Image (spheres, rainbow, N blue to C red):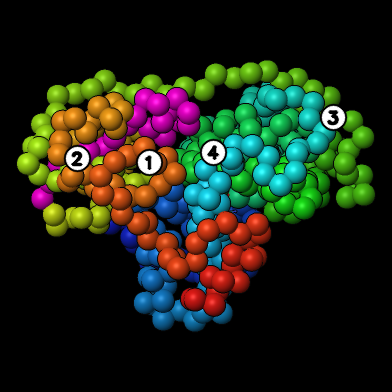
Amino acid sequence: MFTTDYNKIIEQINAINPSKYASTRNYLNGAVTKLSPYISRGVISTQLIYQTLIGKGIAKYQMEKFVQELAWRDYYQQVWIAKQTQIDDDIKQDQQPVATQHLPSAILNAATGITAIDKGITDLYNTGYMHNHLRMYIAGITCNAGQAQWYNPAKWMYYHLLDGDWASNALSWQWVAGTFSSKKYIANQENINKYCNTNQTNTFLDVPYDGFPLNKIPDVLQSAAPIQLSTVLPAQQPITLDNTLPTYIYNSYNLDPEWHKHDIGNRVLLLEPSHFAKYPVSEKVLNFVIELSNNIPNIQIVVNEFDTLVNLVDIKKVYYKEHPTANHYKGIQESRDWMVPSVKGYYPSFFGYWKKVEKQL
Ligand SMILES: Cc1cc2nc3c(=O)[nH]c(=O)nc-3n(C[C@H](O)[C@H](O)[C@H](O)COP(=O)(O)OP(=O)(O)OC[C@H]3O[C@@H](n4cnc5c(N)ncnc54)[C@H](O)[C@@H]3O)c2cc1C
């Protein structure tokens, strides 16, 4: 379903219809772009997408909603850079009430009884993708109806998403759970029916909005248990590195085929066991990352820690892209391609950030 061919990915950028996007994006069958797996993995950037739309002569007012969504991506990345691992904890206020640290079993097993939700979870397992509105519904059911602390459920969702981006993920869960926003998000059955094209009644969410917060955890969400998430990395194959040449480091957040494309050097897809121990991903996600790396000629996979890899090459000629998960890399750090590179740092709210971005666009 998701191509890994770079030329086809570029074609998908060219096919974006920002007006249709703005009017339909909240619907499951709306004109969303499905570009996030490529943005998250650093194959393409928000800047490249924005410049492509400008190049096509699309008026700014027509693309405002879409560009604002792209800005959410950059915003969350800036929060991650500023707060580092603090994004793993409640940012603005503590989540309350919390009845469990674990994902409700009904979510894990796609058995909430709400057909749109259960189908969305099954599709996530099968495809590695989920529409934004479903992600919001599921986080709301988990944290606000089920009173589960957001962190472990977020890790479960991240594990399965081809577009897994820990900033967008953790901070969106926090936004829904009310720890990085001013109020908790929850939608009722009527809202789900409207955007998911279902017609269900008599579910635990079939209540008017003044029925929230629910006065007790619905029975179907009562059971929750720890789940084990781990990544099986490939076995190391023999590799050849020339330590007289520069070395370009790619990883699961930087798979940009255009990066230093014309420079001769070693190209390494670095799969660090320590990274995947902290941020586990499914086999489907790992295979997707490896397939995307095939767009980079002569790339070799190294399953090891950065500190071991650099013993094999000339550290003065090691190049990598800035990223919060690459803070321990050494060598020459290069910037990512932000939509507006000059707007940096922590903004407590997206709209504070957006105001600055909008002025520069
Ligand atoms: C609980 C939850 C978890 C999420 N986890 C992730 C995640 O791990 N990785 C991830 O990439 N996104 C995550 N998102 C954000 C959003 O759901 C996805 O980026 C979007 O659904 C991707 O599909 P698309 O490319 O078709 O999006 P489109 O609607 O076509 O949007 C275009 C681009 O804008 C950006 N964007 C759109 N909506 C958001 C948003 N709410 N936050 C940040 N950027 C956005 C993305 O880069 C996206 O590719 C999460 C949202 C929620 C509510």
* Image coordinates for residue 89, horizontal then vertical, percent: 64, 37
Please report the residue visible at 53 percent of the width from the left and 47 percent of the height from the top. 80
Mark 3, residue position: 217
Q: Nearer the viewer, mark 3 or mark 2?
A: 2
**Sooner in the amino-acid sequence: mark 2 or mark 1:** 2
Q: Which residues are magenta?
A: 264-286
**Sooner in the amino-acid sequence: mark 3 or mark 2:** 3
Please report the residue visible at 71 percent of the width from the left and 31 percent of the height from the top. 149
**Above or below for 224 versus 265:** above
Q: CA distance from mark 4 to mark 2?
A: 26 Å
Q: Nearer the viewer, mark 3 or mark 1?
A: 1
Q: In which quarter of the view is residue 252 placed?
A: top left
- The tag on residue 85 is 4
Number of marks present in the image shown: 4
Q: Secondary structure at mark 2?
A: helix
**Sooner in the amino-acid sequence: mark 4 or mark 2:** 4
Q: CA distance from mark 4 to mark 1?
A: 13 Å
Mark 2, residue position: 315
Name the kind of residue labelled 2 in the image. Ile
Please report the residue visible at 29 percent of the width from the left and 41 percent of the height from the top. 330
Q: From the viewer's perspective, is 121 left or right of 237?
A: right
Q: CA distance from mark 3 to mark 1?
A: 40 Å
**Above or below for 240 versus 258:** above
Pointer 1 residue Cβ closer than 8 Å to ligand 1:
no
Q: CB under 8 Å between callouts 4 and 2?
A: no
Q: Secondary structure at mark 1?
A: helix
Name the kind of residue labelled 3 in the image. Ile
Local crowd at mark 3 within 10 Å, few (<14), some, or many (≥20)?
A: some
Asked if one can make out residue 334 in the rendered structure from this viewpoint, the answer is yes
* Image coordinates for residue 66, horizontal then vertical, percent: 54, 66
* Image coordinates for residue 228, horizontal then vertical, percent: 55, 19
